[in-house]
Image (spheres, rainbow, N blue to C red):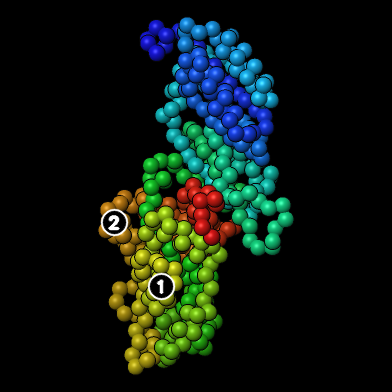
């Protein structure tokens, strides 16, 4: 198309709706091709065999626009489709082009089942922040009419354009909706880093595992309640982690090493853990356990789940019994964060390409330094401080936050 034709071309937006079947888009675009039109933008979606197709085209200056419109409307009629059209003024088109550079964000709604109340509240919040919804996509599989009684999961992803009017208010509102409506909302900038995460680091106790392992060991030593109380206080951030670890491990002195395999065998993985890790491996991610727990159990999980890297605290064992001490540098909050950064350096990636998942106060530095830090079924202090939370679904919900659809996963 030369400069004269470009200057006199007419822009038209066509919208087609109707029952979907193979060949509709091909037939309509072939008619446009016969007039030498350019396709400027296109968007197509199908909901339960119902087609919604938008085509913005540029009609050459030497072609009669009305002829193009009449031809497309006639073709749509023959295909049993409804057709609407709208001429786009040059000034309006230029404004649309000018919006190309606006910020883009992804808002991920996670729930056991998406309700109209949840959907309306999230949509209203987006509008109040002056953001435009470009695309809404369902990432979860088609919900069954009758469930089998097992845990369900649902995810809808909003692709947004613009900058929020009040980012602080937005964060507070997202947290409020999550609490009131039993859902999780993940807000991410839609940039190259989001689409190229490479490392996923997980806490172990109460994240990858359902239990706090040290509490399970303490039960075998007969000091369960005493140790559990210290653990809970540490996770709330009320006690320095290093001191709390020393206190708890000291209470285990004299316990036979032979009880450790028995404890490992009864530990239960968190919902979605195996599904998350098997699919991350399939997609080429590197995985790591960065834990304030103990190497014996972290290595047990490494072997079971094919985890790439493990860093945890080592229990000192002498003559087949726990001494009540740990060996070497304690893996605490800052150590976890440093290990995450070191993993990124070793793999030659930016820290923005890392994901960290944890539940306790000692995970916060790691969560803040990761490109995507997720507080998983976390204590209130952690949920309020972390940028992202998952409290309603299992660990495999993280896959939705990466934009992965259920149909792309192996169970």
Who is closer to the viewer here, 353 or 265? 265
Question: What label sits on residue 347 in the rendered view?
Answer: 2
Question: At 36% from the left edge and 50% from the top edge, which residue is drawn?
Answer: 353
Q: Where is residue 86 shown, x and y percent of the image?
A: 59, 16
Who is closer to the viewer here, 23 or 135? 23
Q: Where is residue 185 shown, x and y percent of the image?
A: 55, 49
Question: At 35% from the left edge and 66% from the top edge, which residue is drawn?
Answer: 309
Is residue 262 at least partly visible in the picture?
A: yes
Quick one: SS at disc 1? helix
**Residue most toward the right?**
146
Mark 1 lies on residue: 303
Q: Is residue 315 left or right of residue 146?
A: left
Residue 16 quadrant: top right
Q: Do the residues labelled 1 and 2 touch (CB within 8 Å)?
A: no
Total marks placed: 2
Is residue 367 at least partly visible in the picture?
A: no
Who is closer to the viewer here, 266 or 373? 266
Question: At 68% from the left edge and 47% from the top edge, which residue is drawn?
Answer: 115
Q: Where is residue 102 shown, x and y percent of the image?
A: 44, 30
Residue 300 quadrant: bottom left
Mark 1 or mark 2, earlier in chain: 1
Quarter of the picture holding the C terminus: bottom right
Question: What label sits on residue 33 in the rendered view?
Answer: none
Who is closer to the viewer here, 169 or 130? 130
Q: In this view, does 242 lie to the left or right of 112?
A: left
Q: Where is residue 321 shown, x and y percent of the image?
A: 39, 91
Decide: few, some or many residues near mark 2? Use Cα within 10 Å; few <14, some 14-19, many ≥20.
Answer: few
Mark in the foreground, 1 or 2: 1
Residue 306 vertical placement versus 185 (above, below): below
């Amino acid at each position: 198309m030369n400069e004269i034709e470009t200057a006199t071309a007419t822009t038209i937006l066509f919208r087609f709706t109707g029952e979907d079947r193979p060949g509709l888009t091909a037939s309509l675009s072939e008619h446009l091709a016969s007039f030498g039109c350019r396709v400027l933008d296109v968007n197509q979606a199908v909901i339960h065999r119902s087609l919604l197709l938008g085509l913005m085209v540029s009609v050459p200056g030497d072609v009669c626009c009305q002829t193009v419109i009449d031809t497309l409307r006639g073709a749509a009629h023959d295909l049993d489709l409804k057709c609407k059209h709208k001429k786009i003024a040059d000034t309006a088109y230029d404004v649309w082009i000018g919006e190309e550079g606006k910020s883009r964000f992804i808002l991920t709604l996670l729930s056991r089942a998406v309700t109209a109340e949840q959907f309306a509240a999230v949509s209203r919040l987006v509008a109040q922040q002056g953001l435009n919804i470009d695309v809404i996509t369902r990432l979860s599989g088609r919900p069954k009419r009758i469930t089998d009684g097992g845990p369900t999961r649902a995810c809808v992803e909003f692709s947004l354009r613009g900058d929020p009017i009040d980012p602080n208010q937005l964060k507070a509102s997202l947290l409020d909706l999550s609490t009131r409506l039993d859902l999780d909302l993940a807000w991410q900038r839609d940039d190259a880093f989001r689409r190229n995460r490479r490392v996923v680091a997980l806490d172990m106790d109460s994240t990858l595992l359902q239990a706090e392992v040290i509490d399970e060991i303490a039960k075998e030593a007969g000091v369960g309640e005493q140790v559990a109380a210290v653990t809970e206080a540490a996770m709330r951030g009320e006690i320095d982690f290093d001191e709390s670890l020393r206190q708890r491990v000291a209470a285990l002195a004299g316990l036979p090493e032979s009880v450790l395999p028995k404890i490992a065998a009864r530990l239960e993985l968190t919902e979605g853990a195996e599904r998350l890790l098997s699919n991350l491996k399939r997609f080429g991610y590197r995985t790591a356990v960065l834990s304030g727990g103990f190497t014996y159990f972290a290595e047990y999980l490494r072997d079971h789940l094919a985890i790439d890297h493990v860093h945890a605290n080592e229990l000192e064992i002498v003559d087949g019994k726990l001494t009540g001490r740990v060996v070497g540098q304690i893996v605490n909050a800052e150590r976890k964060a440093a290990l995450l950064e070191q993993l990124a350096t070793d793999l030659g990636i930016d820290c923005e390409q890392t994901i960290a998942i944890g539940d306790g106060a000692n995970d916060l530095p790691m969560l803040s330094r990761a490109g995507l830090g997720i507080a998983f079924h976390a204590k209130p202090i952690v949920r309020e401080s972390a940028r992202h939370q998952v409290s309603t679904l299992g660990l495999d919900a993280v896959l939705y936050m990466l934009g992965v659809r259920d149909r792309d996963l192996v169970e």
